[in-house]
Image (cartoon, rainbow, N blue to C red):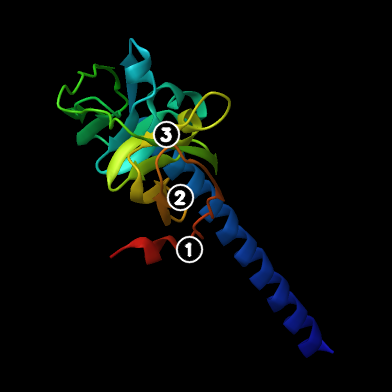
Amino acid sequence: MLTAKKSIHTKNSSVRAALAICLCTLLLSGTALHAQNKVLGELQLQGATGAEKDAGIWVDGQYLGYLKELKGSKKILLLPGEHDILARQAGYKDFRQKVTLQPAEVRLLPVTMEKDLSVTMPKVTAEVKLSVNPDRAAVFVDGTFVGHAGELGGLGRGLLVAPGKRKITISLTGYQTFETEIDLVANQKFQLKTDLAKVAVPADPSSLQP
């Protein structure tokens, strides 16, 4: 009988210890997250015209979305240090700038797009209308960025390309890249619909390390 009581007491002590460890872990995690938020810097992008506002934005080689949406819940928070900022828009030269952020700094970066006079539209075209979810995904034709899906679909919107075989690539961070090849004839209207599949997030963050 005494042995049984001791066993129960030991078990209860183990449970209390485990709960205490869990509580400490949660408190430490919350503290670390709060500390990280204080360390991160914020980059705010500003564009004056539609060319800048609809430009695709890459930070350190990773596509984040188009300029005018990158605020609020989609604001750009970066670790302190140097970052490579790239803005791309169809028919314009790339805008590229290095930015160095300090901890908790808020930096405003004006983005200006310059027309690329070497780009010419084909005399004969076919039209591709896109319906993509999420529509903020970046769209490439034969490896060239042409805009985000939202501006290339819907009423009165479409993508004009030269007839022939065209490779369409649609990508967005956190989703599987979609690729397809289509063969178009002159004046053809082609509709492309797809729902991008989310990439599964590993349960163990350490598995993300190379």
Q: Is residue 120 left or right of residue 13?
A: left
Residue underneath mark 3:
159
Whole-percent x and y of residue 4? 80, 87
The foreground one among 9 and 67 is: 67
Mark closer to the chain start, 2 or 1: 2
Structural distance between the alpha carbons of marks 3 and 2: 25 Å
Using the rendered view, name the quadrant where residue 82 is placed: top left
Q: Label 1 amino acid?
A: Pro
Which quadrant is the N terminus positioned in? Answer: bottom right
The foreground one among 82 and 175 is: 175
Callout in the foreground (3, 1): 3
Direction top: furthest residue: 48
Residue underneath mark 2:
174
Mark closer to the chain start, 3 or 2: 3
The foreground one among 201 and 23 is: 201
Q: Is residue 134 visible?
A: no
Q: What secondary structure is marked by label 3? A: strand
Whole-percent x and y of residue 64? 38, 37
Residue found 33% across the figure and 10% down from its top: 48
Q: Is residue 189 visible?
A: yes
Q: What secondary structure is marked by label 2? A: loop
Residue found 24% across the figure and 19% down from its top: 113
Position above or below: 37 against 132:
above
Mark closer to the chain start, 3 or 1: 3
Q: Label 3 amino acid?
A: Leu
Q: What secondary structure is marked by label 1? A: loop
Structural distance between the alpha carbons of marks 2 and 1: 12 Å
Pointer 1: residues within 10 angstroms few (<14), some, or many (20+)?
Answer: few
Whole-percent x and y of residue 157? 50, 27
Pointer 3: residues within 10 angstroms few (<14), some, or many (20+)?
Answer: some
